[in-house]
Amino acid sequence: MNGWIGRCLRVNLTEGKHQIEKLDTDALEKYLGGRGLGVKVFTDEVDPNIDPLSPENKLIFCSGPLVGTGAITGASCNVITKSSLSGAGFDMVIIEGQSESPVILSIIDDKVKLVPGLEYWGRSTAETEELFKKNLGDQWMARETFLVSIGPAGEKLLPLANLVNDRFLSVGGAGIGAVMGAKNLKAIAVKGQHSLQVADGSRFVQVINTLINKLNSAPLTSQSMPQWGTTFLVGLCYQKGILPRNNFRSTSQPLKNVGTEALNSAFALRGRGCFACPIACIKKADVKYSAFEGKGMVPTYLAIGTLGFNCGISDLSAIGVMSVLCGEMGLDPVATGGNFATVMELVEKKAVTPEELKIDISFGNADSMIEAIRLISTKKGYAKRLGQGGMAISESFNMPEIFMGVKGFSLSPFDPRAIQGMGLHFATCNYGPHHLYSYTFIDELLNVHENLDPLETQGKAALVKRYQDTSAVVDSLGLCNWPLMGLKFNNYVPMVNSCLGTNYKADDLLSIGERIWNIERIFNMKAGFNMSHDTLPERFFKEPIPDGPAEGQISRVKEMLPEYYQLRGWSEQGEPLQEKLQALGLEE
Amino acid sequence: MPRIKIDHTKCTGCRHCEAACSLNHVANTVNPRRSRIRVMRDGNRYYPVIAGPFVDAACTSKQYIVIGDQTYDMCAFCRASCPEKPYFIEAETGIPLKCDFCGIPPSPSCVRWCNTGALELVED
């Protein structure tokens, strides 16, 4: 088989057993791999109404067929679970059950085993990785082994917890860390030596040469991203009034010390590329701030927006420290930022006093926020109630309107009143409001392929649908979406075909994306979500932006929603219609 | 004589060169194990190492380099196809691998795919 390996590893933690299964070729062609295949298997095997932290929940790691082949940016792995890797010789790893004591799943050169994990329990993600590699004994083996682990936050079942790969790359943020923590699985270590087959090697090499040239001739993928990573968005979003401040209540405070120039002077940036990535948007550096020093990832746009600006903090070194701490403790920056922004507004509205919280959390107070991040991840003492997630905290004080999130997840740092298409995506996304499931800002803000006004609603429903489907396909192939800032989706097609030996056209791939989006939607609906959840917090409909370039704007999601449902082939209540499901080959 | 100049300060550790080399030397196959260039990692830094000519073990003892407060294991940066480490050896046959500049005239595939300028073909 080309690209795909065709094998799946199923590990049952309750029994401590594993088995290797063959993957169904039809499903591979219909769902590609990665996100698509994972979601398909997950929805087939898991009851939508289970408790996310129970042994019945499953955790699926699924890499795409293009991963590891040298296809540009072919390095991503998708993790599918109900919320709260590659070259290893498997397309998919399914984790079931629950282990009695902490374990690490080790998949090294085809030898699958569960290693007792007691000595790793309680350690940060970086320490876990270091210790595990040391315990391997062989430095050559250690060099090729990669770990994805949870930090103390995941062990304590915090809803903000995520997984951390290779010390800094975080996965998810939908409480995946807590799911893994509930299974008593500390980490998964992977090392492979399998060869991957490509259908037409010489054509594949040619296609990649052209794609690299294309990326190099586009300004964003040849200059902005390699130089600063996603941080270059900070200045742009600020100019358009999209960058939220103080829990989405302002956009115009002085942008002091947070921009690309400040970034250059605050850190000695060093690019880090994921496998086969010509862009290398991740930046690493040494981080220093008062009592803290550490190595890690320079804050991305997400971290600056959520942990920094939206909490009123504009000191880059402090944001850097928070971002590194989140990585070490296994916390998701978006959820953590949203969590604290909620608490800060509660304090400001006098719903709770700093004395009651025993920590002076308020907008702009970086020192106490750094302390709070440490405290919540270990769930110690009075900080217990601070780490429940924004929604739970705001509800416990009877002020649910203060939580800026959809379907329980905090908003990514884009003010939906100033960028309408992204707003519609936030309202409808199956995963909660995350901008990486629909890159509408590529056209709305950066104007790469189309020149759209972020404040307009015209044509945005179609834009959102297109980008949602695109990202479902790109995720399923195991690629990254960022090259879309320099490439059209059509440019991906020859790469896919020469690698897999298939004859997909762009439309075929997009309809695969639509199929994936629909099964995700159906699963969510079985789990109790409906049209009433396709909305934004009331603030965005009632309170116009008080200042800045987008002053006076409110969100017009409700106007766009019927058009979006219609384009998706759903009923007015947002339910996928029978004809649509039949057309996508999903009829039951 | 043309040679490949390595500037490790520009390397991002993406290992695209390994994929390029493997695809170019083994038909339709990607496997860093079969590649004649490997990217070594040390903390935040990455060092591409290109397979050199095979020689009998030239080292009589293990060497370490000390730069600043860091100690580096020489074996990690050594170009030899050596039984001590699993790199630059064809796994099935045990034949040592050596960079051939992707034929004559030299047009190394690793240099073509290296987008950051860490690898560069220069004329001496």
Image: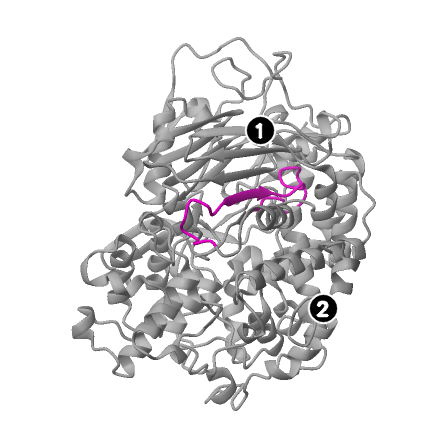
Residue A561 in picture, x, y percent from top left: 64, 78
Viewer can see residue A486: no
Residue at 63% x, 44% y is A74
Image: A567 above or below B71: below
- Quarter holding residue A348: bottom left
User: Does the magenta portion include A73?
Assistant: yes
Q: How many marks?
A: 2
Q: How crowded is mark 2: few (under 14 residues within 10 Å), some or many (20 or more)?
A: many
Give the residue displayed 37% in from the left and 40% down from the top. A186
Q: Chain letter for mark 1, please.
A: A
- State the quadrant of the N terminus of chain A: top right
Given the image, on which type of amino acid does mark 2 rest? Arg
- Label 2 or label 1, whichever comes before in sequence order: 1
| Circle 1 crowding by C-alpha within 10 Å: few under 14, some 14–19, many from 20 | few
Q: Which mark is residue A471?
A: none
In this rendering, would A53 be left or right of A75?
A: left
Q: Name the residue beneath numbered marker 1.
A: A20
For disc 2, the chain is: A
Residue B15 lies, with reference to residue A177, above or below; the image says above
Residue at 56 percent of width and 55 percent of height: A226
Numbered range of the magenta stretch: A50-77
Residue situated in front as seen by the camera: A149 or A499: A149
Q: x, y (%) of residue A24?
A: 70, 37
**Location of residue A204 with respect to A546 vertically, above or below:** above
* Mark drawn on residue A568: 2
